């Protein structure tokens, strides 16, 4: 056990999924007596103090000024990342996405360089998709926290390519085609990013990779029952936890009386902060769910005022998901990694309706492993969605399997060990990294 209070600097991507994953780790560090500081923009100002987290605000100057979740989502809709196209079709947009990540990295890198001498961290916890040279060159031990599907950590030919939504037991020729497509459309962007990182003093990045995970302790949250280590083992500098789940102790929740008195099973429906901005599709899905005999708690998203709910529903802009999940019988989700891992924690079946990115992989993995059903968020029919709800609610064998998974996850309580792991890494980095 370390004999000093660590200054832990968290540098997450400033989206709800990434920040929430880091909160789960930060809470455990704080419980162990350490200081947790998050590098955030003004959009997040004041939102983390309830967890005991300090905020180090970035300056608004730079190539990427702070933007809200709505603005991010509208941009993603405009370029086609959010919408009804397939994962394969969206792979052709990777060059545009790579441009955005380059600008993001340059801005975050500059802010990190400015804040490092102010905070003087003992360890840096990054939740990013691309390398930040300021962290790599700082001499401070770095932990890469992946609040994403494990496929994103390292591209291994033995597993499906990330963001493809292809099955681990499927046609590997499709894996190869998808990989080649992504490499073709991102080759020039990767070369430019690599030149920038090398120009900042970093070693060259692995080919077609915007980060180098071998230089960090890597931690990620994914249940054992869904992970890919059976087909693609990872090295000693990769440590799995079942979930990077925050507690939300300060956010009490009870089923509203107007919903509690109605008949039917209780279902939680959330498309996440970003995907829910597609109001047209939210209206379509809500209209289908209105025909169900069951009750729905709905996380409506930031544009919640632009559509209305039916009588069998209750919702708000956002709900305390950790408090809601134990109360429901079924979850309908965009299959973001936090929702998937948290729902597995509580042992609930899922209808997974991915919209973009690693959501496709999570949805397919759930489907393949028999813990839920994958549907198309934009093309599923009324009959398909309503039938899927009834199928999962009436699957007693699945309920028993999920209850056993939940018992294992809660008994193992793996995230409780994250503080000791990071302390050990700070004291002896070579134990984990050559």
Image (tube, rainbow, N blue to C red):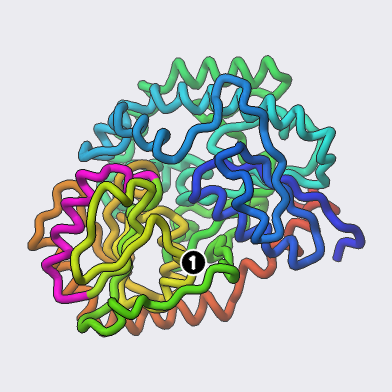
Compare residues 58 and 392 and report the one nearer the observer.
Answer: 58
Residue drawn at the location 40% of the way across and 53% of the way down: 336
Q: Position of residue 122 (x, y in %)?
A: 83, 46
Task: Count residues near mark 1 (Cα–Cα under 10 Å), then give few for <14, some for 14-19, many for 20+.
Answer: some
Residue drawn at the location 70% of the way across and 24% of the way down: 202
The quadrant the N terminus occupies is bottom right
Q: Position of residue 146 (x, y in %)?
A: 56, 49
Mark 1 highlights which residue? Answer: 224
Compare residues 328 and 237 and report the one nearer the observer.
Answer: 328
For the image, the number of numbered tags is 1
Q: State the SS at label 1.
A: loop
Residue drawn at the location 73% of the way across and 45% of the way down: 9
Compare residues 95 and 23 and report the one nearer the observer.
Answer: 23
Q: Position of residue 361 (x, y in %)?
A: 36, 50
Residue drawn at the location 40% of the way across and 82% of the way down: 403
The quadrant the C terminus occupies is top right
- For residue 1, side relative to residue 234 (left or right): right
Q: Is residue 416 magenta?
A: no
Q: Main secondary structure of the magenta part?
A: helix
Q: Position of residue 335 (x, y in %)?
A: 36, 55
Vertical arrangement, residue 196 with respect to residue 411, above or below: above
Vertical arrangement, residue 340 with respect to residue 135, above or below: below
Quadrant of the image occupied by residue 262: bottom left
What range is drawn magenta here?
Answer: 274-294
Quadrant of the image occupied by residue 263: bottom left
């Amino acid at each position: 056990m370390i004999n000093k209070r660590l200054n832990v600097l968290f540098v997450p991507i400033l989206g709800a999924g990434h920040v929430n994953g880091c909160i789960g780790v930060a809470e455990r560090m704080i419980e162990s007596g350490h200081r947790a500081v998050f590098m955030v923009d003004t959009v997040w100002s004041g939102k983390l103090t309830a967890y005991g987290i300090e905020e180090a605000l970035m300056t608004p100057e730079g190539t990427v000024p702070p933007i809200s979740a709505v603005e991010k989502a509208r941009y993603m809709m405009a370029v086609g990342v959010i919408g009804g196209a397939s994962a394969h079709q969206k792979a052709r947009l990777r060059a545009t996405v790579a441009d955005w990540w380059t600008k993001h990295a340059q801005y975050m890198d500059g802010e990190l360089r400015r804040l490092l001498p102010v905070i003087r961290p003992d360890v840096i916890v990054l939740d990013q998709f691309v390398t930040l040279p300021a962290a790599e060159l700082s001499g401070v031990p770095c932990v890469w926290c992946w609040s994403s599907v494990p496929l994103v950590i390292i591209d291994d030919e033995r597993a499906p390519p990330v963001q493809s939504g292809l099955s681990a037991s499927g046609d590997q020729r499709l894996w190869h085609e998808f990989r080649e497509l992504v490499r073709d459309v991102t080759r020039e962007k990767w070369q430019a990013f690599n030149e920038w990182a090398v120009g900042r003093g970093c070693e060259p990045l692995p080919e077609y990779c915007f980060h180098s995970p071998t230089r960090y302790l890597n931690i990620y949250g994914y249940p054992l029952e869904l992970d890919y280590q059976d087909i693609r083992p990872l090295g000693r500098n990769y440590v799995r936890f079942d979930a990077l789940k925050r507690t939300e102790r300060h956010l009490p929740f009870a089923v509203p009386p107007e919903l509690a008195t109605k008949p039917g099973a209780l279902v939680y429906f959330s498309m996440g902060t970003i995907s829910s901005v597609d109001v047209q599709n939210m209206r379509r899905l809500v209209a289908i769910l209105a025909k169900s005999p069951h009750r729905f708690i709905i996380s409506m998203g930031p544009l919640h005022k632009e559509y209305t709910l039916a009588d069998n529903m209750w919702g708000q802009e956002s709900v305390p998901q950790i408090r809601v999940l134990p109360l429901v019988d079924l979850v309908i989700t965009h299959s973001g990694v936090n929702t998937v891992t948290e729902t597995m924690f509580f042992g609930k079946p899922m209808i997974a309706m991915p919209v973009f990115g690693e959501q496709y992989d999570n949805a397919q993995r759930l489907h393949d492993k028999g813990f839920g059903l994958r549907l198309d968020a934009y093309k599923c029919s009324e009959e398909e969605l309503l039938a899927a709800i009834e199928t999962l609610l009436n699957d007693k064998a699945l309920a028993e399997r999920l209850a056993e998974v939940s018992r294992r996850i809660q008994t193992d309580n793996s995230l409780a060990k994250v503080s000791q792991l990071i302390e050990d890494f700070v004291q002896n980095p070579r134990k984990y990294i050559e």
